[in-house]
Amino acid sequence: MKKGVLEDLEPKLVWHIFEEITRVPHPSKKEKKLREWIKRWAEEHRIPFKEDEAGNILLMKEATSGCEDYPTLVIQAHMDMVCQKTPDTVIDFENDPLKIRIVDDYVTAEGTTLGADDGIGVAYGMASLISEELKHGPLEVLLTVDEETGLTGAFNMKKGFFTGKYLLNVDSEELGKITIGSAGGGETHYTIPLNFEKKKGWRGIRLSIKGLRGGHSGVDIHLPRLNAIKVAVSGAIFLRERINLLLRVIDGGTLHNVIPTEAVCEFLVPEEKIEEAINLLENWKNDIISKEREKEPDMKIEISEISEEMALTEKKTESILDLLNKIPHGPLAFSKEMEGLVQTSNNLAVVRSDKEKIEIFLSSRSSVDKELEDLRKKLKILGEKYGAAVEQGEAYPGWQPDPDSPFLGLVKKIYEDILKKEVSLKAIHGGLECGMFLRLDPELQIVSIGPEIKDVHTPEERVYIESVGVLWDVIKGIIENMGELK
């Protein structure tokens, strides 16, 4: 039997399960193969489980002897992963396993996201159910679907699916920090009909943006990183202010919770202006690459001629470029209570265009419900002003910190005993499912922890090997000391 890439890493049980997970495709909304694998695994290990209509799975284990009066602990993680790849990587995320490897002190994947967010959390939960060294009270391992693209599993979970009053979310990404709050959020979808005309005496240009750093639209939104769609729009507007320009196509971004790393914008200019247009764009390109080199050292901007005759009208071109220019991207407000924490933000996430329509997808977040509501109202008004049909799904709630929670006190004590130093508490601008679980049970006490994971939602995603063992010790300590909460 072929030796696993991670076979020699400690803790062996956690790494073995995680490696198995990387071999089973599990993109957001398409977790069926992983769900089936988990259920087979549960049957093999004689672990009782149940599944709800949304596809969420609850694995259960009775208390070991002497721990029957411990309160039930829920260990929670999500099954789906964000699937991103480098331009030259060939992979079918719905059918192919990931190619994982060890690089220095990290586990990563070749040319793709690793899925440690949140495959490693799933592995911790499953490992806790079959570890022979643990003495524990009743355990419930709650594994949700589609966290990354709408928290669908948590949204559709019914009250009573899990029973524990103490929930350990394993979906954080910094060792030595305990997350006690997160932002709420919601999506906005614009659809605008398009009308094309055949233009004789015009020539086509393609403007392509590649190599941006991207990142998580919550966790990384405050970092000095560019949005590829915004860069492409700025180039088109720069040229439009100097030469007549008719838009043909604009596409960019992949997922609502990823800062776009690539975009393509195609347009026509008068035939006699083609050389001037390309020269102007080359000057713009050199200027922006020089200006943004520190932010985006690998940014590539390609300008090329294309053979096209169809384009949008001048009015529609102006309308779409102006709308994309006015859509806010990045932090819009910062917390007054926690220095450096983004309070409200918006991500211009995806633009797709075809012969009939252009679609624009936005992702908004805020830890203040009123600010989120106001932002989404403004985005609706903005889209309608430019003739868009606007759809806005139900927003998910934020998770308000409870610094006096006895469960938090227990987790912090155990974490610090193992780490031998003080552990910090934080709230994040990213979205977690915790607010949804509190909506099901307001008495629930929740904390979130995780190992050290870098560059989530990008092909550079990697997990620090040593941190996985440290966090496993923390999780075992929490499990074994739940009796303190009796």
Image (spheres, helix red, strand yellow):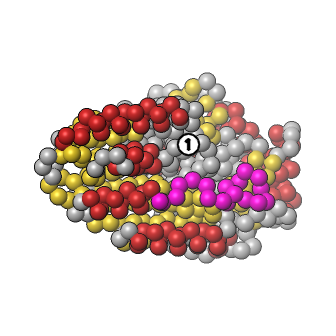
Q: Mark 1 = which residue?
A: 225
Decide if residue 393 is on the left or right side of residue 90: right
Task: Out of 169 and 229, give the one closest to the viewer.
Answer: 229
Task: Evaluate whether residue 81 shows in this view.
Answer: no
Task: Out of 325 and 162, give the one closest to the viewer.
Answer: 325
Residue positioned 71% across, 54% down in the render: 341
Q: Position of residue 216 (x, y in %)?
A: 56, 48
Residue positioned 40% across, 46% down in the render: 238
Residue positioned 86% across, 44% down in the render: 422
Q: Position of residue 333 (x, y in %)?
A: 66, 59
Decide if residue 303 is on the left or right side of residue 138: left
Residue type pointed to by label 1 = Arg
Task: Evaluate whether residue 226 shows in this view.
Answer: yes
Q: Position of residue 127 (x, y in %)?
A: 64, 46
Magenta span contains residue 328: yes
Magenta span contains residue 60: no
Identify the image quadrant of residue 482: bottom right
The quarter of the image holding the C terminus is bottom right
Identify the image quadrant of residue 472: top right
Question: How crowded is the residue under tag 1: few (<14 C-alpha within 10 Å), some, or many (20+)?
Answer: many
Question: In the rendered view, would you say 212 is above or below 179?
Answer: above
Q: Position of residue 327 (x, y in %)?
A: 48, 60
Residue range corresponding to the magenta coloring: 326-343
